[in-house]
Image (cartoon, grey):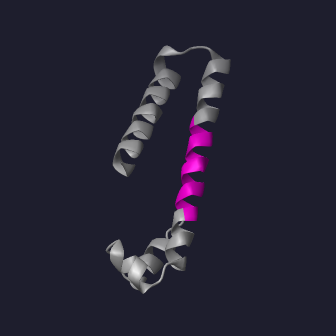
Amino acid sequence: MESSIHQKQAYEYASIAKEINGTDKNVLGSFIKAAGIFYMTIGTWRRRSFERRQLLRMNYNELKDIGLTRIDAMNECGIKF
């Protein structure tokens, strides 16, 4: 399910970028679309940050259930965005 969400976001980003780069000459429309991309990107970063903090709070058994070790979780939490 997570993969399909990422694919949908990638498709939306690509279609918005296409409109901004070529077919849409309306400056205000382009600005609004660019702001939308920015907003979605910030949302993605915030979600990842939250999920990484949750990894640090998991105990050994919870991490084992999802196929991670404490070291894996710590490495993932060291990633910035």
Question: Residue 9 or 38: which is nearer the viewer?
Answer: 9
Which region shows up in magenta?
37-50
Magenta stretch holds residue 14: no
Magenta stretch holds residue 43: yes
Whole-percent x and y of residue 39? 62, 41
Whole-percent x and y of residue 72? 39, 78
> What residue sits 68% from the left and 19% below the top?
28
> What residue sits 49% from the left and 73% below the top?
55
Q: Is residue 11 left or right of residue 36?
A: left
Residue 68 visible at all: no
Q: Is residue 51 above or below residue 29?
A: below
Whole-percent x and y of residue 8? 40, 37
> What residue sits 56% from the left and 56% below the top?
47
How many numbered marks are there? Answer: 0
Q: From this viewpoint, which residue is outermost toward the right?
A: 28
Q: From this viewpoint, which residue is outermost toward the left?
A: 67
Whole-percent x and y of residue 11? 40, 33
